[in-house]
Image (spheres, rainbow, N blue to C red):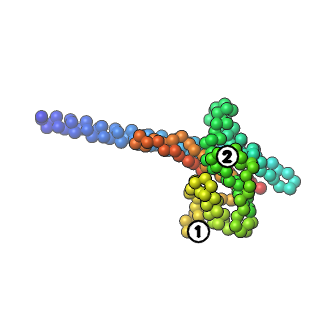
Amino acid sequence: MKLTDFALVFVLCVWCVFSNISFQNDLLQEHIFGTMMYNNIMDNVIEDALEKSVSFDMAGFTIDRDKIVEEIALERGKFMGEDESYARYQKIRIQLIVLTYPDGFYLAGGKDINTFGEKEKIFYSEGNVTPKETKVKEILEASNEKYHLNMLLPEGKSTGLVNTVEDYQLLVIYETYPVTFKGKSYGKLLLSGAKVKK
């Protein structure tokens, strides 16, 4: 073989390697943008569902917990351009739902999603004056204990981040489309939330 033949073989090998890397980068970029788009859609869905589940009166407002899950499923179906039967299927995509109040929170997950309106309120250990860090910790512990889901929310001042849990807030963890990596499929969960503006 001549030196030019070796150079040609080398160039072909390098081209194959770099084209494979470029293809993988394109797939990763498409996956990241797809996830961002889906997360943005779900943020809007949760906000709309909470808005449609709140009713205002002279005494303040009430949140209809029975309506929240139905509205999430219907709103998601509208955003995805699917019919109402498909929207009802979306209920099983909700892995965890938390509705926070000043003195406690409601929690449902898995097969309990349909009974969210019947759940008992879980009171914070210190009631209305519970610090935010303690509220976050108690919500995380309850979701892990009851539904084996670890939410990665910032805890305490040591993280340097502001806590994401407020009073009268709806937090939803939902399952998105699976990710395939090296031939193995992985489920992916995302967190969205909305807050009632008083």
Residue 162 at x, y percent in the picture: 61, 62
- Residue 121: quarter of image: bottom right
Work out how far the residue at label 2 is from the one at label 1, CA to CA, in angstroms.
32 Å
Q: Is residue 128 above or below residue 45?
A: below
Residue closest to the eye, 30 or 193: 193
Q: Determine which residue is flagged by label 1.
A: 157
Q: Is residue 70 visible?
A: yes
In percent of the image, x 63 and y 66: which residue is there?
Answer: 133
Q: Secondary structure at mark 1?
A: helix
In percent of the image, x 67 and y 47: which residue is there?
Answer: 112
Residue 108 at x, y percent in the picture: 67, 51
Q: Determine which residue is flagged by label 2.
A: 113
Q: Amino acid at mark 1?
A: Lys
Q: Secondary structure at mark 2?
A: helix
At label 1, counting other C-alpha atoms closer than 10 Å, the crowd grade (few under 14, some 14-19, many 20 or more) is few
In percent of the image, x 62 and y 35: which residue is there?
Answer: 80
At label 2, counting other C-alpha atoms closer than 10 Å, the crowd grade (few under 14, some 14-19, many 20 or more) is many
In percent of the image, x 35 and y 39: which residue is there?
Answer: 20
Quadrant of the image for the C terminus? bottom right
